[in-house]
Image (tube, coloured by chain):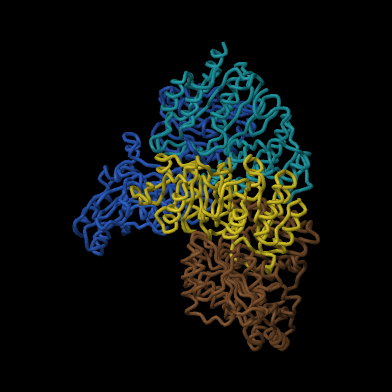
Chain colours: A blue, B brown, C cyan, D yellow
Amino acid sequence: MNIHEYQAAEIFSRYGIPVNRGIVCASPEEARAAAQDFGSRVVIKAQVHVGGRGKAGGIRLAAGPDEAEVAARQILGMTIRGVPVHRVLVAPAIDIAREYYLGVVLDRASRRVVVMASAAGGIDIEEVARETPEKIVREYADPLLGLHDYQARRLGFALGLEQDLVRPFAKLARQLFTAYMAVDASLAEINPLALTTDRSWLALDSKIVLDDNALFRHPEHEALRDPQAEDPLEQEARAAGISFVRLDGTIGCVVNGAGLSMATMDAVKLYGGAPANFLDVGGGASSQQVATALRLVLSDPNVKAVLINIFGGITRGDVVAEGLLEALKTVDVRVPLVIRLVGTRQEEGRRMLAEAGLTVVDTMEEAAQRAVQAAEGRETRA
Amino acid sequence: MNIHEYQAAEIFSRYGIPVNRGIVCASPEEARAAAQDFGSRVVIKAQVHVGGRGKAGGIRLAAGPDEAEVAARQILGMTIRGVPVHRVLVAPAIDIAREYYLGVVLDRASRRVVVMASAAGGIDIEEVARETPEKIVREYADPLLGLHDYQARRLGFALGLEQDLVRPFAKLARQLFTAYMAVDASLAEINPLALTTDRSWLALDSKIVLDDNALFRHPEHEALRDPQAEDPLEQEARAAGISFVRLDGTIGCVVNGAGLSMATMDAVKLYGGAPANFLDVGGGASSQQVATALRLVLSDPNVKAVLINIFGGITRGDVVAEGLLEALKTVDVRVPLVIRLVGTRQEEGRRMLAEAGLTVVDTMEEAAQRAVQAAEGRETRA
Amino acid sequence: MSVLVNRETRLLVQGITGREGSFHTAQMLEYGTNVVAGVTPGAAGREVHGVPVFNTVADAVAATRPNVSIIYVPAPFAPDAIYEAVDAGIPLVVCITEGIPTLEMVRVYQYVKSRGCRLIGPNCPGLITPGQAKVGIMPGYIHQPGPVGVVSRSGTLTYEVVWALTQAGIGQSTAVGIGGDPIIGTSFIDVLAMFQEDPETEAIVLIGEIGGTDEEAAAGYIREHVTKPVVGFIAGRTAPPGKRMGHAGAIISGGQGTAAEKIAALEAAGVPVAERPAQVAELIRKALG
Amino acid sequence: MSVLVNRETRLLVQGITGREGSFHTAQMLEYGTNVVAGVTPGAAGREVHGVPVFNTVADAVAATRPNVSIIYVPAPFAPDAIYEAVDAGIPLVVCITEGIPTLEMVRVYQYVKSRGCRLIGPNCPGLITPGQAKVGIMPGYIHQPGPVGVVSRSGTLTYEVVWALTQAGIGQSTAVGIGGDPIIGTSFIDVLAMFQEDPETEAIVLIGEIGGTDEEAAAGYIREHVTKPVVGFIAGRTAPPGKRMGHAGAIISGGQGTAAEKIAALEAAGVPVAERPAQVAELIRKALG
């Protein structure tokens, strides 16, 4: 789960990390007032859950309240990578000597949490990792003991910091690691981490991504969720226990299982179509869940055909068919529907569906081909 | 470091453990008022840092305020194992169905923390361990991961608890373990742990011993120290960085090193004397520390002779001698002094001491023998 | 032969009295798996489909000597169940549970490894040696005994591929679902090594998906150590970056984990990668000659 | 031969720029110990008595290949220093530091063990192989090379015994101070096993004190595994229960750890126990025949 910069900064500051505290503003007028309060040059930053906001013009410097208001008005009118900006963060501009990167992330390959730092701060760290990986220094935290003090210091030495900066930097690295572990993050990042002209450390941008799997043990994190920043369909799906990701194609997919769902999307593409979504109804695939899934998929106006791909597994085919028929009673299906159903008692299931006048096909490949054709208008609902 | 029952109960309760909260009283009148407040039968317990207070009469039941006042007066006038009682804890008497024992302690043999439980609660657990060890069940906590939930449950099952009691008991065991780790205890104990007649768990007596080595990282624990409960000489020694334990013999000992100090005490005993104390001046053995040590030892009126045993080690003999002579200038030595000094430059050191008119002997054995004789008045100060 | 589970498997079911645990115990028994015991704290003395239930794994081990445990316990309690199984000395633990916090798994992984045990999963369908033992939630009937080892990060997609194999008359030695989480106990490489050693396995199917770099690592391993033919399938060619595709581990992040990279790595290691699940059967047939 | 340290020892000093670290580095160099490097974070580039100083153990290892590290770092930072040494692959770490929290040592002990390294101490005087290498704070001149292995929980008491041996003309193979804390990295048994294996060690002195049950465990081990003569000394016959006698580990608690029990256990294992330190030399002379 993504949270906003200002929320991450608040969490970091709870763990002792010095952050450039700003004021969250929802209007140009609020931004003007904030700039007035700070009485200095300010920076105005779009609060959106996507990267690259700097390049997109979502970060502006303002010399005073007037400029702040203008800049805020422009940013609040923007859409960055398809996401409208609803809030900006107004913070004092800082006199920076140097910019660093400091981040904590799970390293899947080593099954450990890794703390990364770089003197090439302020820019896209993924680019640094690709282009000049030697500019990133890493320490792998012990799975059971965490980040040792000596490792935190070693990061500072490896960055070539002056002696007097190493200990404060190491402290910061430990604090960031502690925050990461405490909130069950999958990413915690300070970029840029500023060394100010008075030789102190300050987090200029704060980023945290929370581990969805761990939300259950942090009920307080629910309050950090920004409904405005999320796709409403994805929100509805989550509430129904369905994994759903909206894409920009025309073929709606309703599948059981994440891997099979991706494979279904890939098959649609293979046969010349474009999937409108990823959707995994989950293991149970009850009639209610299938109905919700169908409704979700159909509420996307781009959808021209729906492909239902169920590998019954433990669930019996007749039960799935029953669920589907039940679901179809409550959902208005306005586009062609292609169903592929396999699994225990598939014959019974298919017969039930065929009797209800639904197209049931044998293989996933056939289903994908049919769905593509249907979306192109070459075939109508059976 | 020992703390009082009421302090331990306060800590336990901070970690969610249900404790029988009482009121600490320093006078019979306060005890009467407390009993009045509770409006029920109360138990009145001496707050002292020694075991066996129950057997010694330091725990009394009172039916009401009148009895509470009488009981408190008696207990406040007691001396338990040489320790005068300055405070009592007045707490409501509880309707108990069964009594258990639950404790967390370091198991030195396995280098792990062990959680122990027994259905033979309320009595001396060391006695249970000796007489009927099978009545104690144990779980060894993982050094890095702590006490697993399944281990806490297993304790409950092993005690033969009814199903509905196992989970609450396991929770309690985990809480006690958490408290133990959090405060850096060397012992945390609930004895008895009561199963009340309404089937809930309640800690009737709470005990915590804190790890002296960990006090530096818990500055808040300093406030738990009860100066009244400690030997004033031991307090003074601690303040000076000297290890000192008062014993009841007549020969004061000033030694460098804990093992050598014990061996010196043993030698005194071996030659028919009785050591007045254990004293380790520590590694440095500066003149100031030697002076403090001498003063400490001499302030015990029982001391009839002082034995100084220094194995110079890295410290040079002449430096030690200098320190001793320096120390003797500021301390009034009213009893015979026997000095044994070995180590680098021992010759120089001994000569310096001899020139100052002090008895210096070659071996620890000789020193012990001389000190015993001196204490018996068979020899005077050289 | 097969790998990991077979007729000698003596299975313990942790969480046996739960809805899932009880249902799948019946299914596994029906398939012929030797389920010797179950554990649910506080349910000792009960039976589930004739299987005796114990309060603790230690009790179950003492009474029934299981050598494999399967865990159907909700995510908040699953790590504890894994620790209990490992501490009781069970050498192979299969964790079906989905939704375990990732940082919890960092600890669990290290602990299990340090004890010399093997964990399959979590968030996996389990594993099956057709005709011998089913230790998981996959439908048994889609499998048939044969020469192909299957290893997969997915659930139903594995069924799809296995079903394609079976329908093409190609049986499986063992099919192992290693799980869809970012941190899993057993990697592709571990299972590839077992299949390479297993005399009954003649070819291997590797089913990967976007996220992480385990497929790339597997490709490197195959190039160096696997002499048997391997056929691959990678799901998620159309997945966008930064979005979690159901599985906690199926996410392209930090520019890593795309299907294209994985396919390229496998092909560079001489592994043909199918475009469709059904094509896996064709490629395997070709490989087996 | 000797055990643990010898002429091949390449010593790293952690905390070399501190008062203690610097002083004892000079002493160890004077004794002839091969001190190859020191570590103090932020002091890289400096020299202490001619020994080059590094910021991190990893740097020191890369540059000077030490095989033993000795730690003179204050208690709050000593565990980290141990982890750093172990993680850098140094097989033998000697921790002089006194006052490390016991629960910290529970973790350190487990970690060091899991990495296959050996820790001596903490709260110990270190160890010495007379004439070859002194890795500790003991006065060097009281030792002389010879056939007696010494292992002890104490500091100055060990000097006392060693001095008695030397004055009696009996030299030492290696003298190991294992430390006075409740949890120490190396136990009597570990060192007894080494002395039993060491061809140059002909007899062994074991110096124990009150607290814990390590002497009893050692007695059991001697009975089973040690064929060389062992002489014991136990300090604290006159110590009262419940009082910590200086060393954090020297406390009779829970009715365990009395000198009487330890002496009885050793004597039952055929180990004569001296009443006075000087008597150790007499008993050793008798044992060596």
Which percent across, then down, holds residue D105?
56, 54
Toward the viewer: A256 or A252? A256
Q: Residue furthest top?
A: C289
Left or right of C136, for residue C107: left
* Residue D264, x across and y down, in percent: 76, 58
Total tally of numbered discs in the picture: 0
Q: Within the image, what quadrant is residue C145 found in?
A: top right
Q: Is residue C231 left or right of residue C2?
A: left
Viewport quadrant of the N terminus of chain D: top right
Q: Is residue C20 left or right of residue C154?
A: right
Q: Quadrant of residue B51?
A: bottom right
Residue D95, given in percent of the width and then of the height, sits at: 52, 52
Query: Which of the two residues, B87 or B313, is positioned nearer the viewer here?
Result: B313
Residue A203 in view:
yes
Residue C268 falls in image quadrant: top left
Residue A299 visible here: no
Residue closest to the eye, B236 or C233:
B236
The relative height of residue B120 versus residue C10 in the rendered view (above or below) is below
Q: Measured along the vertical axis of the image, is residue C234 above or below residue C103?
A: above
Q: Please say if A352 is above or below B347.
A: above
- The outermost residue toward the right is B131
Residue placed most toward the observer, B156 or A326: B156
Depicted D73 relative to depicted B190: above or below:
above
| Relative image position of residue D218 (x, y in whole percent) | 69, 51
